[in-house]
Structure formats: structure tokens, C-alpha cells
Image (cartoon, rainbow, N blue to C red):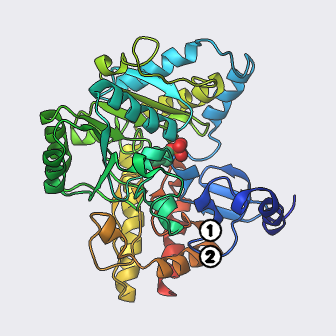
């Protein structure tokens, strides 16, 4: 196997920036990315034969750790019968039953192949259903890379110094109203300013794409009330939080029922899957029943759904959420203790198996306060951790993730390493 550096040199000749998703390029922390040849449990094994304790977890999906034997066996069993049929298949019904059972707002669901497809399709459905064009999103919330949603979209775009992507027509951007998160008054004012024009409000109910930001008490309920009052749909983008914060996502934990919900990441068990679902009367606006078109050659793919179903059944069986929260608190407490010893003002917002580390004295509650985090210091911290064998997301504006595989020696070792890294900053 070639070294990471040799592979990256080849990749740079052939792939823009050498990567197939921008944050992987390490541009905001500096240096060159490592290549991974294998992963198991909480560990990545690089092309250079280094073992790293992984807090990226393939950007969220790997809640059971990498290459879990049960998921691997489910894929192998499905593979015996073929890789894609292009017809309805039994896995689709089983997956729909699981999603409807666990996610409170979902009565009907449509499978697709990524989180981006899920949010893009949910927005089209909301516009078709309400016959309105404008949408509201929040600064720092990332909903995938479709045109209407790639505006003030958090981590990836932010990391590269382009909060708004080139190539999005101004006419599209005009239909997207961007508001500060955790600001109920701004939301009410936007509805007052655009009466009868707003199709939907889409949000990450717990933000994870500008680091972790949790909603103030009452904020989500206020969003539910104002959308209902104005006949707009409330869309929870739970691509990251679905089956991670709880089996039913943030909506289960916060007791808020959105009209539509987007899923991805964990529901694919490490293979490419997305889904969106919600109220049956809205979902029935989709083709072939209704006028809103949405489709996919590989949607409902048997291998991907076999992996996803195995992962969800494992969550049902293990119910690991209290254990995951204990891991999250252990990590948060270790980082905060090391930062306090060093006299370094630090925020570690954490909920269950999601956390992030902001080097700032300012409590982080929206995009503006997230940007007060010291990104240069974060880059040094990132490299100090990596040199010692801990891999955090290579950006100051990403969430970290824990899996059940971090329990035991991995979390203890990682806390020790992160504390040392902070001590030496
Ligand atoms: C990851 C993510 C997406 C996009 O999903 P992809 O599968 O990368 O297209 C959308 N919304 C949220 C909240 C995400 O975290």
C-alpha cells in the first residue's frame, strides 16, 4: 500500500483538491489528509499503518463503531441475492416500518440516497404542498448542497471562507430567507414581513454543522407555533440527529412534532441512504400519487437498506443512549478540566454522543457566537491530538461523534490525549 502522502499526490492530479468532499482536505487545520485503508470499532487504520481513535465516525453514521459484525453480516446476506433490482423490494417495507415506528412525526416515508436528496426533496414537497415559494433557514445550519439551501450553510462552506457558494443563482437565493438561530423574534418578524409567502421553515433542531448548538428552552416550540399559525410547514432536518440523539431523534426528546423530517447518515448503517417523511396528507403529494416529482435509480437499494435495518434493529435492542451520553459527558468534563487548568476559556456543548469544542469565553448559541471560537488555536489542538493518535473533525465548526465502540479503553485514552494536547497548547 502506498503512503498517504503518495496517494494524496496522485489524487491531487485527478480529483479537485484531492478529495470527494471538501472538509476532508484539511484546509482549515493545515497539512495533508491521511488516507484510511480499514476501520473497526472506534479505530481507523491509515495507509501508513497508524491507528487513530476516531471521533468523526464517518461524519455521523457509525454509531455502533466501524465495521460492526452484525451490519457486515446483514450486507453479506443481502449480497447473496443481488445488488439492485429497480423494483420494489422487501427491505423497503421493513425500513419504512422501522422509521414510522420510531420517528414520532413520520406517518409515511420515501427513501433516497443521501441527506442532500432528502432535504432537497422535502423543500420541493413543502413548496408544492403549500403553493408558496419562500423558505426560511438559519445561519450555520447545513442541509446538504442543493441550491436553495447552500446559503450561510455552516461548516464545509465556512471552513473554506465561502459562506455562500458561487453558482447559486441570485434568483434562487432570494427565495431563501436566512435568520439567526435561537431568535424567536426574528422568526416572527420574517413571517410578518412575507405574509402568505413562506412554504416552510427548515432547521437542524440541534445544530451540528457549525459545531454543536442547542436550542434555548421554548425555541423549538415557538417555531412549531409560528409555522402552524401561518400555514407553513416545519421541517426538522434530522439527518445528523435522527437515531443519534434518541431513536426518534430530537423531536422525540423535545416533544415537538414537525410536519416533515429528513433522515440520513445512521439509517444507512455506513452505506449511502437518505429518507424524508412526515404527515401522510403531505407525503401523498409526491408522485405517483401527487404532483410533486421525486425519484431515484438506486433508491431503496437492498444492500444499503439491509445495512441500515441491521443498524436500527441493533439500536432498538441495545438502547445505548444513556451509555453514549455518559461517554459524551466524560469527554466534555475531561476537556473542560484541562482547559480550566490551563486557564483557557473553552465551551464544550454536548448532547448524548454529539459534542464540539470551541475555544472562546462566549457561550455559543448561534452562528455569530460560534465564529468567536479561536479557529487557529483549534487547528493546533487538532494536530496535537492527531500526533498522539486521536482524530477529531478537521475543522473548528464540526460536531464530534461517539459510538458504542468508544466505551472502555478508547474513551479513557482519548480523554488523556486531549487533556495533554490542551496542556501543551
Ligand atoms: C450531513 C447532513 C446533510 C447532508 O447529508 P449528505 O448525505 O452528506 O448529503 C444534511 N443535513 C444535515 C443536518 C447533515 O448533517
Q: Residues within 10 Å of mark 2 (few under 14, many from 20)?
A: some
Out of 75 and 333, give the one closest to the viewer: 75
- Quarter of image, res 363: bottom left
Residue 369 point in image, percent of width and height: 30, 71
Residue 24 point in image, percent of width and height: 62, 60
Out of 284 and 190, give the one closest to the viewer: 190
- Which residue is label 2 attached to? 30
Q: Is residue 103 above or below residue 9?
A: above
Query: Residue at the spot x=36%, y=20% of the render?
Result: 283
- Which residue is label 1 attached to? 26
Q: Residues within 10 Å of mark 1 (few under 14, many from 20)?
A: some
Out of 64 and 170, give the one closest to the viewer: 170
Distance, label 1 to label 2, CA atoms, is 6 Å
Q: Quick check: 62 left or right of 108?
A: right
Query: Residue at the spot x=62%, y=12% of the render?
Result: 87
Q: Secondary structure at mark 1?
A: loop
Residue 257 appears anywhere in the view: yes
Query: Looking at the rendered structure, which numbered label has been put on residue 400?
Result: none
Q: Is residue 398 above or below residue 92?
A: below
Amino acid at each position: 500500500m502506498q503512503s498517504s502522502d503518495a496517494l494524496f499526490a496522485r489524487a491531487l492530479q485527478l480529483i479537485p483538491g484531492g478529495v470527494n468532499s471538501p472538509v476532508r482536505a484539511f484546509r482549515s487545520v493545515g497539512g495533508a489528509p491521511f488516507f484510511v485503508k480499514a476501520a473497526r470499532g472506534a479505530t481507523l487504520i491509515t495507509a501508513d499503518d497508524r491507528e487513530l481513535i476516531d471521533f468523526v465516525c464517518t461524519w455521523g453514521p457509525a454509531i455502533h463503531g466501524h465495521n460492526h459484525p452484525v451490519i457486515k453480516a446483514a450486507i453479506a446476506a443481502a449480497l447473496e441475492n443481488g445488488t439492485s433490482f429497480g423494483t420494489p423490494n422487501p427491505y423497503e417495507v421493513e425500513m419504512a416500518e422501522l422509521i414510522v415506528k420510531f420517528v414520532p412525526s413520520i406517518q409515511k416515508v420515501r427513501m433516497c440516497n443521501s441527506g442532500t436528496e432528502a432535504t432537497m426533496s422535502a423543500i420541493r414537497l413543502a413548496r408544492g404542498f403549500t403553493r408558496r415559494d419562500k423558505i426560511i433557514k438559519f445561519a450555520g445550519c447545513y442541509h446538504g448542497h442543493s441550491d436553495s439551501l447552500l446559503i450561510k450553510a455552516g461548516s464545509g462552506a465556512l471552513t473554506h471562507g465561502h459562506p455562500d457558494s458561487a453558482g447559486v443563482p441570485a434568483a434562487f437565493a432570494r427565495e431563501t430567507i436566512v435568520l439567526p438561530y435561537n431568535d424567536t423574534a426574528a422568526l416572527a418578524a420574517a413571517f410578518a414581513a412575507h405574509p402568505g409567502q413562506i412554504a416552510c421553515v427548515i432547521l437542524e433542531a440541534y445544530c451540528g454543522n457549525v459545531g454543536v448548538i442547542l436550542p434555548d428552552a421554548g425555541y423549538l416550540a415557538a417555531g412549531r407555533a409560528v409555522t402552524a399559525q401561518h400555514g407553513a410547514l416545519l421541517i426538522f432536518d434530522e439527518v445528523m440527529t435522527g437515531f443519534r440523539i434518541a431513536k426518534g431523534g430530537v423531536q422525540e426528546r423535545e416533544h415537538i412534532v414537525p410536519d416533515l423530517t429528513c433522515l440520513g447518515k445512521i439509517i444507512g448503517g455506513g452505506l449511502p441512504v437518505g429518507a424524508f417523511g412526515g404527515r401522510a396528507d403531505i407525503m401523498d403529494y409526491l408522485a405517483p400519487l401527487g404532483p410533486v416529482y421525486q425519484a431515484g435509480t438506486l433508491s431503496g437499494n437492498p444492500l444499503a437498506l439491509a445495512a441500515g435495518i441491521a443498524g436500527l434493529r441493533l439500536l432498538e435492542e441495545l438502547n445505548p443512549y444513556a451509555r453514549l451520553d455518559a461517554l459524551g459527558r466524560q469527554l466534555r468534563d475531561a476537556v473542560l478540566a484541562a482547559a480550566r487548568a490551563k486557564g483557557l476559556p473553552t465551551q464544550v456543548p454536548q448532547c448524548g454522543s454529539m459534542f464540539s469544542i470551541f475555544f472562546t469565553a462566549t457561550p455559543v448559541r448561534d452562528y455569530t457566537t460560534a465564529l468567536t471560537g479561536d479557529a487557529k488555536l483549534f487547528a493546533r489542538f487538532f494536530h496535537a491530538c492527531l500526533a498522539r493518535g486521536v482524530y477529531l473533525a478537521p475543522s473548528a465548526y464540526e460536531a464530534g461523534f461517539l459510538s458504542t465502540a468508544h466505551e472502555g479503553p478508547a474513551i479513557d485514552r482519548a480523554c488523556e490525549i486531549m487533556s495533554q494536547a490542551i496542556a501543551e497548547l
